[in-house]
Image: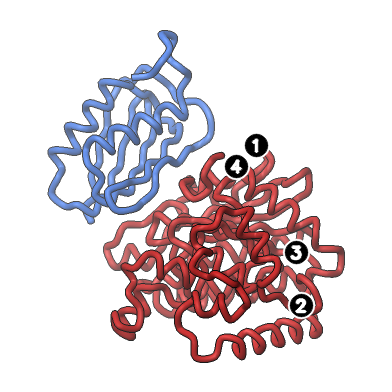
Amino acid sequence: METLNYRFEAGQRPLRGMPQLVGVVGSGNLEIMIEPAPLKGACEIEVRTAAVGFGATWQAVMADFHARWSLADARISINDMGATPAVVSLRLDQAAESLTDPSPAGGTP
Amino acid sequence: MSSYLELTARQRIPAMFDAGSFEEFLPPSMRIVSPHLAQLDAAVSFDDGVVVGRGTLGGQLVFGAAQEGGFMGGAVGEVHGAKLVGMLQRAIDERAHAVLLLLESGGVRLHEANAGLIAVSEVMRAMLDVRAAGIPVVAVVGGANGCFGGMGIAARCANTVIMSEEGRLAMSGPEVIETANGVEEFDSRDRALVWRTTGGKHRYLLGDCQVLVDDDVGAMRAAALDAIAAIAPGQAQLTVDGLLAEQAMLERRLRDTQGMSEPMDVWKGLGVPDPAQVPMLEPAAFLALAAQHRATPHTGER
């Protein structure tokens, strides 16, 4: 297992509601817990993954996620069993959708 | 139609209980994870693969649980089992109307060895304690991973087992039998054979499950409501008469199926005229056929 930590400062979108869990810790899948947390506007992400040595890929996927959502005061905790970057991105969007207001343009990133 | 089998544990709970009524105990945000898996450097889950809590079902206070087959096959570790036991004990304390268990499990989580074995036995004891308190326990088996090993036994500790044709219920799972006794004994990749020996239709014919429904959440919920309503006050407990009737049914079944290893022979032994047709029958036609031939305790349905 490998533990990776990311922190993105100065997010714009706060979360509302109770902590949510999406996904399942199964082969090629992951679970993501998202919860509001007082982080001075930042979004913190902790990843525990069974696939060791993919830090650069995670960094890129997380940076893309932050560019899409810019979450503020958000804690995201991930248990991963080898999900591909596309699956990780979809699950992250699912998690963010569960605790944010629908975008005024209709549809979500 | 909306498949029950395709749903995760977390999706099944709101689909089965009254909308918005379920309150989870030890939710994932509390991060009560397996200490054993962490020691083995294996992936953990924030809910250890089971959702437990209480809600309402048809307006009545019903406690319940849903096992997540996607996490280690729904296997029961120490924390997973303790969550089930705690929920069951609290159902007694709070005088629940019933307990609904959405089971999907390969049995004991072998990574946790004795702690997992003890956990499963404690689940069985707690289920019987709930029944002894006069509270009906209903188990639903309709997930892709089936219900095997210790949890297969636990399912049969319930008052009523509800299955879909796609559900599977047994002691040793197909791969376990093949590993222990060889492929000549049981080919775990022969899916038709696997379903003939463990699937919902076989279990219904043999009297191991009391209700067979379509793989549909609405049908499952309706069956759970009916099953709870069908158990009259004072009928949830294990009784000597009930156990004797069950024993007589098992003896008769053993006698009727002596020396048979192929389920179609067993069905023929039960009197089914054309057993080869059974796997292909539509639900309504199958239930009509099964009504004439399935094994049930002689003193009536438990």
Q: Earlier in the sequence, mark 3 or mark 1?
A: 1
Q: Residue at x 60, y 48 (%)?
A: B24
Q: Could you tell me which secondary element the residue under label 1 belongs to?
A: loop
The label shown at residue B15 is: 4
> Nearer the N terminus, badge 1 or badge 2?
1
User: Label 3 is placed on what type of residue?
Assistant: Pro
Q: Which residue is mark 3?
A: B136
Label 1 vs label 2, nearer the camera: 2
Q: Chain of mark 3?
A: B
Distance (Cα) linking label 3 and label 2: 10 Å
Question: Could you tell me how far apart the alpha carbons at marks 4 and 3 are, in whole angstroms?
Answer: 20 Å
Location of residue B257 in the rendering, given as x and y in whole percent from the top left corner: 56, 86
Q: CA distance from mark 3 to mark 1?
A: 23 Å
Estimate the x, y position of residue B7 in percent, counting from the top left.
48, 46
Cα–Cα span, label 1 and label 4:
10 Å
User: Which secondary structure lies at badge 3?
Assistant: loop
**What residue would you read off at disc 1?**
B20
Residue B87 in view in this figure = no
C-alpha distance separating marks 1 and 2: 33 Å
Which chain's colour is red?
B
Disc 1 marks which amino acid?
Gly
